[in-house]
Amino acid sequence: MQILDEKEIKSKLEELEGWEYKDDAIHTTFQFENFKEAFSVMVRIAFEAEAQQHHPQWTNVYNELEISLSTHDAGGVTHKDFKLARSIEDIVDAGE
């Protein structure tokens, strides 16, 4: 899997609201009404991540979910990260 250069990453980020590139990964944060909603979304993301065989680095504190995506095997951001980011966006949008 080939890593994307910074220009490609920034171009693809224009298609994703609220995501940014730093430290060789793409990052976003979501806030939900409460912990139960945040955790419910995390479960749905977990099933999708497993289906894609690509897993996020994430943290959850109460109603906030922070997600970082990077393809560790490739050493940077690849198309796999953007595919999962779009899936995450779809999951979050469906829950609203």
Image (spheres, helix red, strand yellow):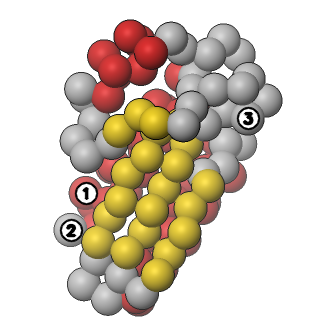
- Mark 1 and mark 2 residues within 8 Å of each other at the beta carbon: yes
Query: Which element is circle 3 on?
Result: loop
Left or right of 82? Residue 90 is left
Q: Is residue 1 visible in this depiction of the protein? A: yes
Classify the position of the C terminus by image quarter.
bottom left
Q: Is residue 34 above or below residue 29?
A: below
Q: CA distance from mark 1 to mark 2?
A: 5 Å
On residue 93, which mark appears? 1
From the viewer's perspective, is residue 64 above or below residue 5? below
Locate residue 6: give its quadrant. top left
Nearer-N-terminus badge (1/3): 3
User: Which image quarter is the N terminus in?
Assistant: top right
For label 1, the SS is: helix
Pointer 2 or 3: first along the chain: 3
Q: Position of residue 26 (x, y in %)?
A: 46, 38
Q: Amino acid at mark 1?
A: Asp
Instruction: For the residues labelled 2 and 3, say whether their Cβ atoms are less than 8 Å apart.
Output: no
Q: Which residue is denoted by mark 3 in the rendering?
A: 72
For marks 1 and 3, give the CA distance: 27 Å
Q: Which element carries disc 2, helix, strand or loop? A: loop
**At 28% across and 36% down in the image, what residue appears?**
16
The residue wearing badge 2 is 96
- Which kind of residue does numbered mark 3 sit on? His
Q: Is residue 45 above or below residue 13?
A: below
Q: Position of residue 34 (x, y in %)?
A: 32, 88
**Residue plotted at (50% across, 75% down):** 60
Depth check, mark 2 against mark 3: the one in front is: 3
Give the foreground label among 1 and 3.
Answer: 3
Percent x, y of residue 80: 58, 29
**Whether label 1 touches label 3, CB < 8 Å:** no
Report x, y in % for residue 37.
36, 82
The 10 Å Cα crowd at callout 2, few under 14, some 14 to 19, many 20 or more, is few
